[in-house]
């Protein structure tokens, strides 16, 4: 899918020139030296652009429609994926995918927001904004994981819980609050990864964990920049200004030292440029935190048995 942000345009134009020169290269016409120069220029420009992004530009990257979503990470990291549908009360919520899989042969539970890329899929996934039945489905999977002693991996990427009248009538706030309470009481390891947008309570409802980490170009805040601007200045167009005030990037939040445990590096230019490479790095961090948590849990159990 071809999609790029405004600040990516110079890179897209350079990459297009490189592709054209490669297409025109024949046995009789050699553009290899020109291609190398352009590739060097592209790498330098990419490094300059992505080393000096504003908070608003990072927010745009976190929302990039080619950025990998939960099911992309499932595809590249896990095996034997089995999705669970429905909350056994109202209906299934496609904005939140839940199920079971294996990480290097170890069974686990997976919960994550799922956005859409084209118009049809965006509408189907409700733009990644869950209804209360989505959070109740997630709770159902958490309880099953607790029952069978399975670690839980959650992937956060939502602008927020759906604020529609129907969602409120069906208990949106109660569903989120219940998840917060129940996740805090889980005894199995819960490892949270903010992969894109971490928006308000809609994100927090699946983000209470033993280890919390953020992708390099993800954001995490109590409200979206546009929502913040609309409340403070009655002008949602001042989102870029609000983003600076919110300090919502992974670097900002990591500097606080109390909210997240790690910042996961992304391929140069963002995770959307290389899903496989981004997923490989995420897998390393998931395994690191899972092994550490598993080891500390075993030590605590051994100490309780010996006391």
Image: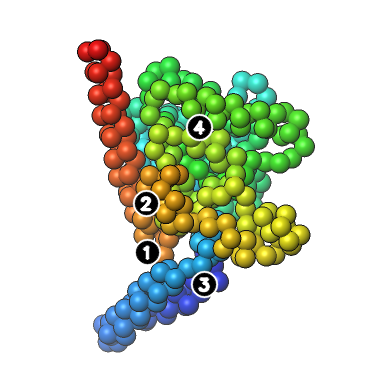
Is label 3 in contact with label 4 (beta carbons under 8 Å)?
Answer: no
Label annotation for residue 268: 1
Label annotation for residue 7: 3
Residue in view at x 73 percent, y 61 percent: 233
Q: Where does residue 47 sit, x and y in percent of width and height?
A: 37, 72
Q: Where does residue 227 sit, x and y in percent of width and height?
A: 68, 54
Marks 3 and 1 sit apart, C-alpha to C-alpha, by: 14 Å
Marks 4 and 1 sit apart, C-alpha to C-alpha, by: 30 Å
Residue 86 visible here: no
Assess disc 1: are there few (<14), some (14-19) or many (≥20) residues with their C-alpha within 10 Å of its C-alpha. Answer: some
Assess disc 2: are there few (<14), some (14-19) or many (≥20) residues with their C-alpha within 10 Å of its C-alpha. Answer: many
Q: Tell me which label, 3 or 2, sits earlier in the chain.
A: 3
Q: Nearer the viewer, mark 3 or mark 2?
A: 2
Is label 4 in contact with label 1 (beta carbons under 8 Å)?
Answer: no
Q: Which residue is mark 4?
A: 98
Q: Nearer the viewer, mark 4 or mark 2?
A: 2
Label annotation for residue 246: none
Q: Tell me which label, 3 or 1, sits earlier in the chain.
A: 3
Q: Nearer the viewer, residue 145 or 81?
A: 145
Marks 3 and 2 sit apart, C-alpha to C-alpha, by: 22 Å
Q: Tell me which label, 4 or 1, sits earlier in the chain.
A: 4
Q: In the rendered view, tell whether residue 146 sits above or below residue 224.
A: above
The reply, left or right, for residue 56 in relation to residue 15 is: right
Q: Which residue is mark 2?
A: 264
The reply, left or right, for residue 193 in relation to residue 199 is: left
């Amino acid at each position: 899918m071809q999609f790029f942000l405004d600040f990516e345009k110079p890179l897209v134009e350079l990459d297009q020139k490189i592709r054209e020169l490669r297409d025109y290269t024949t046995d009789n016409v050699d553009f290899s030296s020109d291609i190398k120069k352009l590739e060097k220029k592209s790498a330098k420009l990419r490094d300059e652009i992505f080393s000096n992004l504003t908070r608003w530009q990072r927010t745009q990257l976190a929302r990039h429609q080619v950025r990998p979503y939960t099911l992309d990470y499932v595809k590249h990291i896990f095996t034997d994926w089995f999705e669970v549908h429905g909350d056994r009360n109202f209906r299934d919520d496609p904005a939140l995918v839940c199920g079971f899989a294996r990480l290097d042969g170890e069974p686990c539970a997976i919960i994550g927001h799922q956005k859409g890329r084209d118009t049809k899929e965006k509408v189907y996934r409700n733009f990644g904004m869950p209804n209360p039945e989505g959070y109740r489905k997630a709770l159902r999977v958490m309880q099953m994981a607790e029952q069978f002693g399975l670690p839980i991996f959650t992937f956060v990427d939502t602008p927020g819980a759906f604020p529609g009248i129907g969602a409120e009538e069906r208990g949106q706030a109660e569903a989120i609050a219940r998840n917060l309470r129940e996740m805090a009481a889980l005894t199995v390891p819960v490892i949270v990864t903010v992969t894109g947008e971490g928006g308000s309570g809609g994100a927090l409802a699946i983000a209470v964990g033993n280890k919390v980490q953020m992708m390099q170009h993800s954001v995490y805040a109590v409200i979206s920049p546009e929502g913040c601007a609309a409340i403070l200045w009655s002008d949602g167009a001042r989102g870029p200004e609000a983003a600076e005030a919110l300090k919502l990037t992974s670097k900002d939040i990591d500097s606080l030292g109390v909210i997240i445990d790690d910042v996961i590096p992304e391929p140069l230019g963002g995770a959307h440029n290389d899903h496989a490479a981004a997923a490989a790095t995420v897998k390393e961090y998931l395994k690191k935190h899972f092994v550490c948590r598993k080891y500390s849990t075993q030590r605590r159990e051994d100490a309780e048995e010996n006391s």
